């Protein structure tokens, strides 16, 4: 299954080559993402995992554009507007590969799901895009002043920029029964806990890259190993408490979130990174 998912992602990267410069997004990115997506839900087929896998890939494209291609706040705001216009049903402008790929994701997923999921997809996309822009504003201010413009807790509260809850909505939407739809709010809240955990796992493993690339990192804002471990434990407990309230019909969705934590703990714990070096 991993090979099938990776092959599909490589086709997407070939269709939109300008979105995936190599480096830092070489062919290994497709394999790493495919492994993460497949490991999180081994009960699904490659076809059923197409939407979350492609969604994960698109996040790398927009993250690169906002963090490293945009040189001014106005350019960041323009990227935000382009993405949000597609989220609201707009048509991509000619030559806008980022918007066209996003429209492909939208048109592949949303027609087959009910309005609850369409609204959640749009909302999580909006949260992620605005959080990415917000962090880039902080990064620019830090570069200009040399002083962190945000607290560690506020930085972690901005973990929507990681995008995993948006990916998870795309994942659940493809096979959502009545119980899952009825408990979407709880699942999103639990996913937000996981999203923060993944943010911390990532930051713990990628301090060197973030320093080199000029990106923010929890460790640059004062998080040490003890703080990270305690925060991960607190967030895991909060996630478990939310998952415990779900009915048996949502057991697979709960297990999916637990497997996300386990995979990322192992991946980042081994100092792996999805990005290649520049």
Image (cartoon, helix red, strand yellow):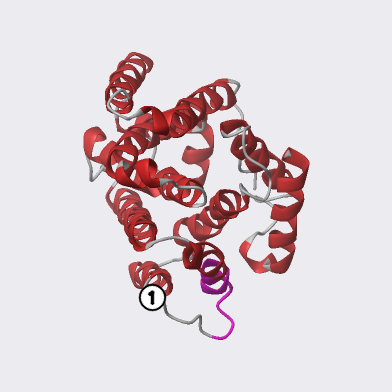
Residue 148 percent location from the top left of the image: 26, 42
User: Relative to 72, does residue 209 appear above or below in the rendering?
Assistant: above
Query: Residue 198 occupies which quadrant of the picture?
Result: top left
Tell me which residue sits at (69%, 61%) in the image: 12
User: Relative to 175, does residue 70 appear above or below in the rendering?
Assistant: below
Tell me which residue sits at (56%, 33%) in the image: 40
Residue 184 percent location from the top left of the image: 32, 44
Residue 192 percent location from the top left of the image: 33, 38
| Residue 158 visible in the snapshot | no
Q: Secondary structure at mark 1?
A: helix
Tell me which residue sits at (48%, 31%) in the image: 252
| Residue 42 visible in the snapshot | yes
Question: In terms of depth relative to the viewer, which is nearer, 183 or 56?
Answer: 183
Query: Residue 204 occupies which quadrant of the picture?
Result: top left
Tell me which residue sits at (42%, 45%) in the image: 162
Residue 127 percent location from the top left of the image: 32, 55
Residue corresponding to mark 1: 85
Taking the image as shown, residue 28 lies to the left or right of residue 182, namely: right
Q: Total label count?
A: 1
* Residue 88 in magenta stretch: no
Taking the image as shown, residue 72 lies to the left or right of residue 30, namely: left
* Residue 99 in magenta stretch: yes
Question: In terms of depth relative to the viewer, which is nearer, 69 or 254?
Answer: 254
**Residue numbers of the magenta segment:** 94-103
Q: Main secondary structure of the magenta part?
A: helix
Question: In terms of depth relative to the viewer, which is nearer, 142 or 128?
Answer: 128
Taking the image as shown, residue 261 lies to the left or right of residue 159, namely: right
Mark 1 Cα shell of 10 Å, populated few (<14), some (14-19), many (≥20): some
Picture quarter with the N terminus: top right
């Amino acid at each position: 299954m991993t090979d099938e998912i990776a092959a599909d992602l490589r086709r997407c990267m070939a269709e939109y080559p300008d979105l995936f410069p190599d480096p830092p997004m070489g062919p290994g990115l497709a394999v790493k993402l495919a492994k993460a997506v497949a490991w999180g839900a081994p009960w699904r087929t490659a076809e059923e995992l197409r939407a979350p896998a492609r969604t994960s890939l698109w996040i790398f494209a927009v993250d690169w554009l906002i963090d490293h291609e945009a040189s001014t706040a106005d350019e960041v705001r323009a990227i935000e507007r382009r993405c949000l216009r597609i989220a609201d049903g707009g048509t991509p402008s000619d030559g806008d590969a980022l918007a066209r790929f996003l429209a492909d994701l939208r048109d592949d997923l949303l027609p087959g799901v009910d309005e609850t999921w369409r609204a959640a997809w749009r909302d999580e996309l909006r949260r992620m895009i605005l959080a990415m822009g917000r962090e880039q504003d902080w990064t620019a201010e830090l570069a200009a002043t040399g002083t962190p413009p945000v607290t560690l807790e506020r930085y972690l509260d901005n973990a929507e920029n990681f995008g995993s809850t948006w990916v998870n909505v795309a994942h659940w939407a493809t096979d959502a029964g009545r119980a899952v739809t009825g408990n979407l709010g709880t699942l999103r809240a639990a996913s937000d806990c996981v999203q923060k955990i993944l943010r911390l796992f990532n930051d713990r493993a990628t301090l060197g890259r973030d320093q080199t690339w000029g990106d923010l990192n929890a460790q640059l804002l004062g998080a040490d190993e003890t703080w990270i471990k305690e925060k991960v434990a607190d967030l895991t407990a909060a996630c478990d408490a939310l998952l415990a309230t779900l009915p048996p019909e949502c057991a697979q969705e709960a297990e999916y979130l637990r497997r996300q934590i386990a995979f990322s703990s192992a991946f980042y714990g081994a100092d792996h990174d999805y990005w290649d070096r520049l």
